[in-house]
Image: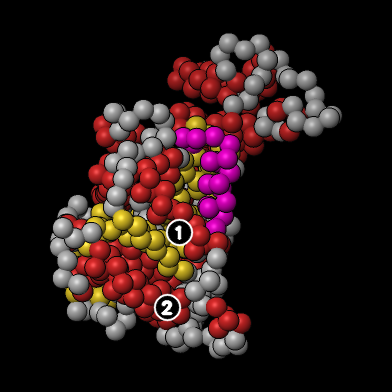
Amino acid sequence: MSEQILLQGKILGIEEFLLSPPGGAAPARSNGEELLAGRSQWITLLCEVLPRALLAEFGLARILLGSSGGGQFLLVLPGEARGAAQEFLSGAARQLGELSGSYLTLLWSVTENLGDWSVVRKRLNEELQHKRATPLAASGAETFQPFASAVPADVDAYFSKELGLNVREASAIGWSPETPAMVHPGVGKHTWNLTTNLSLEGITLARHAAPSEDGRSAATVATLARRAQGRSLWGVLRGDVDSFGVRLRRLTTIEEHVQLSVLYKQFFAGELEVLCSMPEFWRKVTILYSGGDDFAVYGSWDALLLLAREVQRLFHRFTEENLKDFPGPEGKTISMAVALAPEMHYPIAAVYQDAGRNLELAKAADKDCIYVLGRILEWKQLADAADLKDTVVKLAGDYRLSRQLLMGLRSFYQKQAYGDGAEAESPTRTWRFQRRLTRILSGTRDREFQKLRTHLTNEIVGRKSAEVKLRPAGLVALEWARLMTEV
């Protein structure tokens, strides 16, 4: 019986590459949304295409593909294919570095499929870590020789047009051995169908793009900003599963590893595509990418907040159903972050980077939370903020108190109210807060108005506390309401 080996591949430097400046010609649009989308699609597709192309080139069964996506892949191969597989990946790695301006690196590890899965996984990860820690080992003295940049002049056109635009409309993706690190819509020696459903024959890909006014291309960020309710703003939403790596390390068999990896990838690709096709999102949101445990979208600011709540709700249901037999909270919660562009024509890469920083802050502070409008909230607190926002908007709209109301309420959220700093004042008594709020919301004895005012006070301050403890969800709600009522 032939020896069986496992091959694990991983692409490093993805974040740095996505944020890097154009490598060749100038991007098609001034703020580079097509370039960023094209780069994201390239990495997503490359992790799917490379392992499938390797199997197709050597005439191996497609079922030997274990998992793929999210910047990595896992293959089961016969032992005699070891040398050929490494040569195949070496060629892809060289062109990958050229196209990315040396930002991206393809590493792989190989080991015999012998022993317990925890032992096999450890061997694979240790080899990858060794290669990552010794990047000059393979090149030797050639590393220190002077060289000219080998980035093709038309590389940005490839990312922004062929991938950023054409892939969204393509029914299949192709690959050819002459260009092992490139993928092309519909053409190539080997082709695979693009789908949003789980299929061994095809590649799962989320690629929804909000249409432009004429429907011929993806809407620009300026167009998405103008489609927002209230203030014309756009932003980026990023999400990441909490402790997903810990969950994978706790799996005891390769079958569980493959099954769980495929389930998460299918959730993000399938659910994102379906959600973004809904009436409230399809003209306001464009998907940048969906990975094995994370995703990124950009669009109208108001749609991003609603989309975040929907993704979290669906993810909670997904983990309750599919991870009920796995103990521990790891991999069962998700954190997200929203970053809004300071102006309509701001570079999308900068906003994407801000969303990444906000996500790191959220995950460092807690799990299962979101960074939104300057605050980190638990998901229940975001729901409370949405409810409170509706109350403020109704008061502002129905009783024409918008400017006075919002400015007065925001004044309660001064530094002293939180008790920060050495000179902070003592907390305000609830009755005094109530009296000030009554003055702001005075002018009518309407019963509905009185009910809304009482609800607003209770939600900002709390119902039982004798001292004012302003809730962080309150400031998010006020900022949310302000953006919705501004034009």
The answer to if 365 sits in the magenta stretch is yes
Is residue 316 shown above or below 1? above
**Which quadrant of the figure has residue 127?**
bottom left
Looking at this view, name the residue that lies furthest to the front: 1
Q: Nearer the viewer, residue 51 or 314?
A: 51
Residue on which the image places disc 1: 128
**Is disc 1 surrounded by few (<14), some (14 to 19) or many (20+) residues within 10 Å?**
some
Residue at image location 37% in from the left, 43% down from the top: 118
The answer to which of marks 2 and 1 sits earlier in the sequence is: 2
| Residue 11 position within the rendered picture, expressed as x and y whole percent measured from the top left | 42, 63
The residue beneath circle 2 is: 94
Residue 180: quarter of image: bottom left
Q: Nearer the viewer, mark 2 or mark 1?
A: 1
- At horizontal 40% and vertical 41% (from top left) the residue drawn is 249
Q: What type is the residue that disc 2 sits on? A: Arg
Residue 302 is a magenta residue: no
Q: Position of residue 212 (x, y in %)?
A: 34, 66
What residue span does the magenta drawing correspond to?
Answer: 353-369
- Magenta segment, principal secondary structure? helix
Q: Look at 55% across and 78% down and name the residue there.
A: 140
